[in-house]
Amino acid sequence: MLSCLTLVFVAMATSRVAGMISEAKFGVVPTISSPGATAKGPPPSESFPYEDQLSDDYTLYWKFNNTHITFEMVVRTNGWVGFGISPSGAMKSSDVIIGWVKDGQTHFADRHAEGHFLPAKDSSQDWTLLMGQESGEYTVLKVSRPLETCDDSDRPILPGTTRVIFAQSPNDPPSDDAVSYHGSTRGTKSLLLLDPPTSDKQKISLPSDVKTLEFTNRNVSVPSADTTYWCTTWKLPDLGGKHHMIRYEPIIQTGHETLLHHVILYFCDGSLNEATDPAAFHCDRNPLKHSSHCTHVFIAWAIGGKAFNYPSHVGHSLGSAGDPGYFLMETHYDNPRMRSDYVDDSGLRLYLTKELRQHDGGVLMAGVQVSGYQIIPPYEKSFLSQGICDTACISESLGDTEMRVFANVLHAHLLGVKLRTRHFRNGVELPPIQEDNNYDFNYQEARMLESERVIKKGDKLLVECEYDSSQRTQVTHGGLSSREEMCLSFLIYYPRSKLSRCVSRILYEIPDQFAGRSVYDIVHHLDWTDPRSHEGFNHSVAVSPHAQLCHGSHTSFQANLQTISLPKVNNPYQKPQMCHN
Ligand SMILES: *[C@@H]1O[C@H](CO)[C@@H](O)[C@H](O)[C@H]1NC(C)=O
Ligand SMILES: *[C@@H]1O[C@H](CO)[C@@H](O)[C@H](O)[C@H]1NC(C)=O
Ligand SMILES: *[C@@H]1O[C@H](CO)[C@@H](O)[C@H](O)[C@H]1NC(C)=O
């Protein structure tokens, strides 16, 4: 655990790739395929706003309103079709439906699974069959259900990640009680059912003058190491005036879908030195003198994410005076099998237009400062880390302007299970800006909020991450690698303000019996199989203040290391109660 003491951008001159800063390249606007272009099988019975190809043989279409969700499954089989909502991606505790068409008649039931045997029929049948038919090689089932059925055998469908499970079998079961999982094809996938990516919504029409700008890694020989953070520096070409970025998307080299874990494009305050600053280097051996100025997030993309389209009244300004001219792109390669044969050209494609929109957008990074001071003990089922963005930082940077947040990216690593961005005003907790109770490390997507959220002077934010470290035997620290942790929330908002980063870290209070020792030393020598270690550490976390790190772009704003404490929550937000038992 050498890296546990490494802070993110430690300047340390070492190996680098020779050459000067690259200029982002104009590219050709690709044809953006409209949804449906890839779907196989007969067309669905109506036009659905959302669809996903769950496997080569299984297409899921869906739509929803405030109370209900409707699915249509088009599956290449003449046997039975299964679909379900699962807590983890496995069968256990899943809400399952199974249906098939035999002799023109559709058999269908709402079931629940306790394990890998036939899911039992629910006593309350909450899914409604709307249609069932066989069409050539395909079986089509159309079903709807309330988002919340209030049946303990079902699972509510909530905003955030939903793990769906799906299956099909070539055979019809001999009877309703003899559905055999034997011989079936099964799978699981994470979907955002109620807040699908903006790129999934209808075909977008781009202004006719749109041009693309590409930031791509060039022939990076990815080290045969578990984790590599590769940095490249960029200069924006002359755009000839102000533009708005209205869309971005990942450029993922074929075969590198799991290698490319995240790509963050930071912008720099002022300029880099084109003659002396390197074009590419290991981020953790950062030779950039100015690196501390290249820390404002412009785009945060992570694995599983698709394209992001800005709402029609917002664009991210580039090309005018005061806009960023230099960038640092950080690519996180996740190479757990330590392959040495990856040569990578992946990156980001930005779509720019001169048809300016009403507002300039910005990104605020909130959460827990990425450092070894984030400590997660082992053997915990749901350990909580918290990062504060306090009133002083928000008030000082925003003044009387308001920040209107329209999208959010929540980010943690392998142990993350539940993530949320909480919001407080005048001692009252507002509904969370975003919440994901089924976080999936392999599916991270910028999610549009249902409606814009105003953050203003006097507000506080609290980013919370719950981690499951029950399978670990050692302390996990915050850090860059996937095996270390993060707890970050990227808020995408308008109008652009100077506030770009508002994170905190715990200033651990050291109990008397450990006086004179560092928190690292202490946590690495505790016996974590002893519940008293957990109680003692929990106590220290609960009573220790935090240091606030509050950064603005253009160096005009910095209010570092104020000591703050967790918001006092007298009125925690209560979710509206849907079910009355
Ligand atoms: C929502 O969808 C369900 C199922 O399709 C339908 O029965 C219901 O009337 C819809 N509600 C509204 C408000 O449109
Ligand atoms: C990458 O490597 C290939 C094959 O060696 C070469 O043809 C290509 O020019 C290289 N690209 C860049 C940008 O260096
Ligand atoms: C320590 O705190 C976590 C939440 O962060 C909780 O889940 C766990 O039960 C606590 N452990 C003890 C022993 O108090």
Image: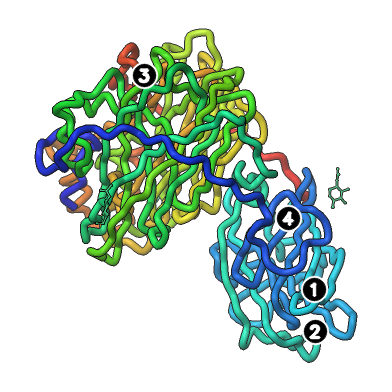
Q: Secondary structure at mark 1?
A: strand
Q: Earlier in the sequence, mark 1 or mark 2?
A: 1
Q: Earlier in the sequence, mark 1 or mark 4?
A: 4
Q: Is residue 64 left or right of residue 241?
A: right
Label 1, label 4: how far apart the Cα atoms are: 19 Å
User: How many numbered marks, from 0 up?
Assistant: 4
On screen, residue 22 above or below 150: above
Residue 386 position, x and y percent, is 41, 37
Residue at (79% x, 47% y) in the render: 67
- State the residue lying farthest toward the left: 14
| Residue at which label 2 appears | 176
Mark 1 residue type: Ala
Residue at (22% x, 48% y) in the render: 523
Residue 443 position, x and y percent, is 49, 53
Label 3, label 4: how far apart the Cα atoms are: 42 Å
Q: Earlier in the sequence, mark 3 or mark 1?
A: 1
User: Would you call the spot at circle 4 few (<14 residues within 10 Å), some (14-19), or many (20 or more)?
Assistant: many
Q: Is residue 414 left or right of residue 483?
A: right
Q: Secondary structure at mark 3?
A: strand
| Residue at which label 3 appears | 552
Mark 2 residue type: Asp
Q: In the depicted view, which residue is nearer to us: 299 or 4?
A: 299
| Residue at which label 4 appears | 62
Q: Secondary structure at mark 2?
A: loop
| Residue at which label 1 appears | 109
Q: In the depicted view, which residue is nearer to us: 200 or 182?
A: 200
Label 4, label 2: how far apart the Cα atoms are: 26 Å
Label 3, label 2: how far apart the Cα atoms are: 63 Å
Q: Are marks 1 and 2 in contact (CB under 8 Å)?
A: yes
Mark 3 residue type: Gly
On screen, residue 251 above or below 388: below
Q: Earlier in the sequence, mark 4 or mark 2?
A: 4
